[in-house]
Image: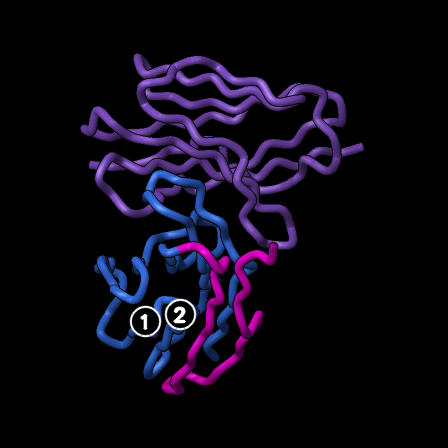
Amino acid sequence: AQKVTQAQTEISVVEKEDVTLDCVYETRDTTYYLFWYKQPPSGELVFLIRRNSFDEQNEISGRYSWNFQKSTSSFNFTITASQVVDSAVYFCALTPGGYNKLIFGAGTRLAVHP
Amino acid sequence: DTGVSQNPRHKITKRGQNVTFRCDPISEHNRLYWYRQTLGQGPEFLTYFQNEAQLEKSRLLSDRFSAERPKGSFSTLEIQRTEQGDSAMYLCASTPGQSYNEQFFGPGTRLTVL
């Protein structure tokens, strides 16, 4: 089965706190791609990152970082020093090799309070 | 460079009526996707086109749903004899080249069936 699980439905933090959003995926394919998207209140999905299954190197982009671990089938997303503008729903998604679609998790709603 | 556009942004209809949505992808993108998102869930794949050819349809796409992409440019999604369960956000996305590329999403069409 191809599946993405985001166990955290909602997270609430105070500005400047660090927060980690969890993502666990299932696939039998050895080649696959993982994504994170942000959906702000305006509703439009915004691409954040793509990772392929052969590249387990962690990535940092400004306040955002991603930890990809094949051993635990996880692709977690950390926001350092969160800001109110980070408030949104965040989706983790999977494209198994040979598939032509994104398989999304249910999303994690992040609320950052001043 | 304009992004993916969708019209209308909102549609309210009565049960049993037909509705049609339009998606204009980014001009050089040959792949176009339709997803459906219900409240509190991640987007679910409906169908995708490569140029004008519809190459895959989800089992979610009942025979009341039809999608077209004439000339490989804009796409339309029609729902016939709408039901209350069709109420959702309908998202369109486009991407150049391969399926593992980033998908660029439009703002969506929110359908409410009364």
Pointer 1 residue: B67
Pointer 2 residue: B75
Residue at the extreme right of the image, as rendered: A114
Q: Colour of chain A?
A: purple
Q: Nearer the viewer, residue B92 or B36?
A: B92
Q: Is residue A77 magenta?
A: no
Residue found at x 44% / y 69%: B87
Asked if labels 1 and 2 touch by Cβ distance under 8 angstroms, the answer is: yes
Q: Nearer the viewer, residue B92 or B58?
A: B92
Residue type at numbered disc 1: Ala
- In percent of width and height, residue A6 lies at 43, 33
Of helix, strand and loop, which one carries label 1?
Answer: strand
- Chain blue in the figure, letter: B
Badges 2 and 1, same chain: yes
Residue B15 is labelled as none
Q: Which stretch is magenta?
A: B1-29
- In percent of width and height, residue B92 lies at 45, 59
The chain to which mark 1 is attached is B
